[in-house]
Image (cartoon, grey):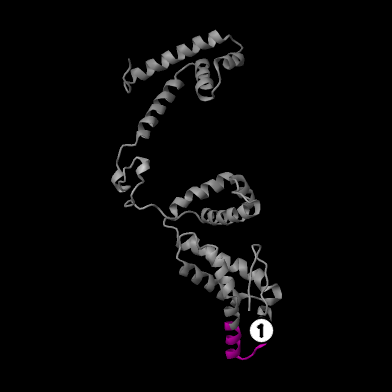
Amino acid sequence: MNTSVGDDGRGSAPGVEQLFEKLRNSADANERMGWRRRIITACLPLADNIAYRFIDRGEPKEDLLQVARIGLIKTVDRYDPAKGHFLAFAVPTIRGEVRRYFRDSTWAVRVPRRVQETHLRAREATESLAQRLRRAPSVHEVAEELDVGAAELDHSRRANTAYRPVSLDAVSAVGDGGGGDTLGARCGVDDPGFSLVEDRILLRTAVAQLDPRRREIVGLIYFDGLTQREVAETFGVSQVQVCRLLKDALRQMRRLVCADDLEPCA
């Protein structure tokens, strides 16, 4: 007896509907248990097929099969033939059981439920779109498929680091500057980014103390990427004037930075 399922949740289950009919019409308890057992046995390939779709996500195959089969048993016990075909009910129910397993039992660090569900749905949508488009889908295509914003999708992907955190005993790659040391051995090492943060705070403070025109010229040139000529056109002045104002602004900023005594000044 073959039980198959397509990507859309539809498929064929020859004989299963008839077995449910016999189960429903049986009055003997032992006989009903027998029909129930036959239905579960006939649908095991369906549950296993769903489990195998999650097999590359780091969880033991045996655990996934067990979760999917438990979901199948729940599905058989809850199915009402009057409400539609068995597969239309079974596929999303079993798949939901596996998703709940990933959501509730496999995350090493607890993250919001919606983030977990978006992450799992995104993986499935990415695989489905890749088959349909015959290429790797973009972030926006996956977000559109899930009907979520690109920012929410990105947040769920970054939360994936909470799924299986890297051990501090793991050896870092030689190419990343770690020289093959463990990650734990590198904890406490001064991060050069800290001094960069301090420099940015100091720079922001210095810019804030300029008069409005000079502050805007510095912002347009160094933060927005405009040329002196474009800034001159914006203000309706000559490029020479912009150059003079910029030099004066930089001179004031340098004086402020040196006065703060955080950087040696030549």
244 shown above or below 189 = above
Instruction: Tell me which segment is drawn in magenta.
Output: 25-37
Instruction: Give left or right: position of 125 versus 199.
Output: right
Disc 1 target residue: 24
Q: Quadrant of the C terminus?
A: top left
Q: Residue at x 58, y 46 (%)?
A: 139
Q: Position of residue 98 (x, y in %)?
A: 53, 65
Q: Residue at x 65, y 51 (%)?
A: 133
Q: Main secondary structure of the magenta part?
A: helix
Residue 3 counted in the magenta span: no
Q: Position of residue 7 (x, y in %)?
A: 64, 62
Q: Position of residue 193 (x, y in %)?
A: 38, 34
Q: Quadrant of the N terminus?
A: bottom right
Element under disc 1: helix
Instruction: Give left or right: position of 83 versus 126.
Output: right
Disc 1 marks a residue whose amino acid type is Arg
Foreground: 258 or 17? Answer: 17
Q: Residue at x 47, y 67 (%)?
A: 61
Q: Residue at x 62, y 68 (%)?
A: 91
Foreground: 233 or 215? Answer: 233
128 shown above or below 36 = above
144 shown above or below 89 = above
42 shown above or below 115 = below
Instruction: Give left or right: position of 175 versus 29.
Output: left
Task: Check disc 1: other Cα within 10 Å, few if <14, some if 14-19, many if 20+.
Answer: some
Instruction: Give left or right: position of 7 versus 183.
Output: right
